[in-house]
Image: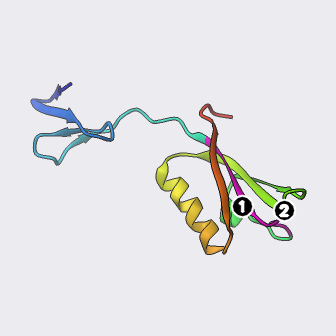
Amino acid sequence: MDLEVDDKRYTPDYDGYMTDTTGTAMIFPEEKPETRYTLRVKGILNGLDWSDWFGDMSIEQDIERGETVIEGMITDSADLYGLISRLRNLGLTLISIEPTRTDRP
């Protein structure tokens, strides 16, 4: 569905952005809600303040399984990939990533 604004015609692209026919102007879609993710990594993270690495995400230890559970809101795929990159940089083994809820806390 095309949209006309100020004598320009905008068409939707694959990300939901509206791009004009020249490809230079864009109309951005409404803000997408954050998604809560739960990530499990092998090993127990303790003894340090991990907020520099994980921001507002909660970190809990699952002693029985020998895993750490990291949970929090992720705004978009770039944010998620950044978190995965930080886990890699720490040498942690990622066990699972699960979106757990799409509404705000």
Position of 9 with respect to 43 (left or right) is left
Q: Which residue is mark 2?
A: 66
The residue at the far right in this view is 64
User: Label 2 crowding class (10 Å Cα cut-off): few <14, some 14-19, many 20+?
Assistant: few
Q: Residue at x 59, y 60 (%)?
A: 83
**Dot label at residue 103:** none
- Amino acid marked by disc 1: Val
Residue 79 shown in magenta: no
105, 1: nearer the viewer: 1
Q: Residue 40 colored magenta?
A: yes
* Amino acid at the residue labelled 2: Gly
User: Which span of residues is magenta-colored?
Assistant: 36-46
Picture disc at residue 41 = 1
The residue closer to the viewer here, 89 or 10, is 89
Q: Secondary structure at mark 2?
A: loop
Asked if 4 appears above or below 46 in the picture, the reply is above
Residue drawn 52% across and 58% down? 81
Crowdedness near tag 1: few (<14), some (14–19) or many (≥20) residues, C-alpha within 10 Å: many
Residue 16: x %, y % from top left:
32, 36
Residue 82 location (% of width, % of height): 53, 61
Residue 70 placement, left or right of 23 = right
Residue 16 vertical placement versus 84 (above, below): above
- Estimate the x, y position of residue 8 in percent, counting from the top left: 11, 33
